[in-house]
Amino acid sequence: MILLNQQKVPGHGVKVRASFRLEDKDLSGTSSATDTAEGGIKPQSLSVSLSIKYTDDSDLTRLLAMARAIDTQTGKRQVYKITNGTAQAGNIRKVKFTENFSYVENATLRMWDVSFTLRECESVPEKIEQRQAQPAATEQSAEGDTITSDEPAPDTITAVANAGGGSVQEMMKRFEATLGR
């Protein structure tokens, strides 16, 4: 049985399968090394399958409406508080419908086979990550001697020229002549 915001999800033969990804990136390049970069723990997903009898078509309509519901305050898909044994075991408290929602006629049994995915919202790893203090930026420095230039900066040349040393072109000619000696 699944409850979403205290509403029972309709259907018979409800099966819930939970999964999540542990992301990492391969850093080995072309070598045989096993180095990886952590990519975090991604939200859990619940794959749900169930059947709804043809005579209970209003249940299917209600379930479709729940999947399509938009939160009027945020303008995003509705987030539901979930009550289910598998969700509880995985510490999943809030979910929203995501990815595929499908329903297929099963004429032999006169019912629809329904399947959909619920993705965890506000997951425990997400909350832990938000609470962790972000590392402070460190100032970088390098060893060695500081190199200075005896050449005046372009702005300095212009300032000297404007202060009575002649035009920039005249000063450049004198400078080039000094270098030629």
Image (cartoon, helix red, strand yellow):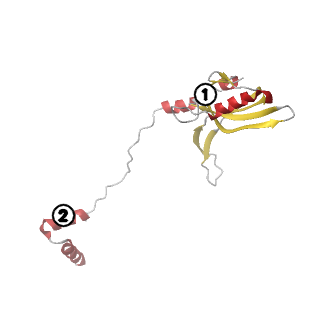
Using residue 40 as the reference point, say whether residue 156 is left or right of it.
left
Location of the N terminus (image quadrant): top right
Can residue 150 be seen at all in this image of the molecule? no
At x 12%, y 68%, the residue is: 164
Crowd class of label 1 (few under 14; some 14 to 19; many from 20; radius 10 Å): many
Tag 1 secondary structure: strand
- Whether 122 is drawn above or below 151: the answer is above
- Whether 91 is drawn above or below 155: the answer is above
Q: CA distance from mark 2 to mark 1?
A: 69 Å
At x 53%, y 32%, the residue is: 72
Q: Check disc 2 and give the amino acid type.
A: Ala
- In the picture of the structure, the residue carrying the numbered disc 2 is 159
* First in residue order: circle 2 vs circle 1: 1
In front: 165, or 145?
A: 165
- In the picture of the structure, the residue carrying the numbered disc 1 is 80
Q: Position of residue 74 (x, y in %)?
A: 51, 34
Using residue 168 as the reference point, say whether residue 147 is left or right of it.
right
- Where residue 157 sits, quadrant-wise, is bottom left
Using residue 127 as the reference point, say whether residue 176 is left or right of it.
left
Tell me whether the residue at label 2 lies in contact with that at label 1, contact meaning CB atoms closer than 8 angstroms: no
In front: 50, or 149?
A: 50
Q: Position of residue 11 (x, y in %)?
A: 75, 26
